[in-house]
Image: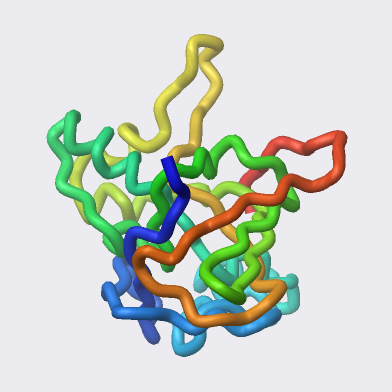
């Protein structure tokens, strides 16, 4: 299966969900042009309160569309942009990429994966019970975070639905993603 962009979303306000748009412009070192989370330093409202000068490792949020299909089987209705992601993908196992993996999106953009997104309680305000569904336990009792990955923009460019995505893994040894 070819890896591609399913949808792109952005919001100029710190809202839980983001609006689907025709395309987004990724800006090197900042994130999605016009998005509330764009910036060189942390833009997440809660984190900004305590660590305003931390580098922004969450410039772009990506989620795999396969998650929505999985959640639908459990009775949830979730679509692109609903969980606050900027880019919805198909055909990439985002959660198992190593730290530092590069996502070459469309003709120009390059996003470096920095870590996992850790969902908060707001997700249950969106749909009751969703937090538990996206944070299940594996067979060893360890939490599995399913709400996508975060990244920084290394090379800017316009990104639209149906753009191809190519993954480049960093030189080994690979480090598993942690929450950022």
Q: Position of residue 157 (x, y in %)?
A: 57, 81
Q: Residue at x 24, y 38 (%)?
A: 69
Can you say which quadrant of the picture contains the C terminus? Answer: bottom right
Q: Quick one: which residue is furthest to the top in this view?
A: 139
Can you say which quadrant of the picture contains the N terminus? Answer: top left
Q: Nearer the viewer, residue 1 or 86?
A: 1
Left or right, residue 83 beside residue 25: left
Q: Residue at x 67, y 81 (%)?
A: 28
Q: Position of residue 158 (x, y in %)?
A: 49, 81
Question: Where 61 sits versus 66, above or below?
Answer: below
Q: Residue at x 43, y 63 (%)?
A: 87
Q: Residue at x 61, y 76 (%)?
A: 108
Left or right, residue 172 beside residue 72: right
* Residue 167 visible at all: yes
Which colour style is shown? rainbow
Q: Quadrant of residue 81?
A: bottom left
Question: Where 117 sits versus 111, above or below?
Answer: above
């Amino acid at each position: 299966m070819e890896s591609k962009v399913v949808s792109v979303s952005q919001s100029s306000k710190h809202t839980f969900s983001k609006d689907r748009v025709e395309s987004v412009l990724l800006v090197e070192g900042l994130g999605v042009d016009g998005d509330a989370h764009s910036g060189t330093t942390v833009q997440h409202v809660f984190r900004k309160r305590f660590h305003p000068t931390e580098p922004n490792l969450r410039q772009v949020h990506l989620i795999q569309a396969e998650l929505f299909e999985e959640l639908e089987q459990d009775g949830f209705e979730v679509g692109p942009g609903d969980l606050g992601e900027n880019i919805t993908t198909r055909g990439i196992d985002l959660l198992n990429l190593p730290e530092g993996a590069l996502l070459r999106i469309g003709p120009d953009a390059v996003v470096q994966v920095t870590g996992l997104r850790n969902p908060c309680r707001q997700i249950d305000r969106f749909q009751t019970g969703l937090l538990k569904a996206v944070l299940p336990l594996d067979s060893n009792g360890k939490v599995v975070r399913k709400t996508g990955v975060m990244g920084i923009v290394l090379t800017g460019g316009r990104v639209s639905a149906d753009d191809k995505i190519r993954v480049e893994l960093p030189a080994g040894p690979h480090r598993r993603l942690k929450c950022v």
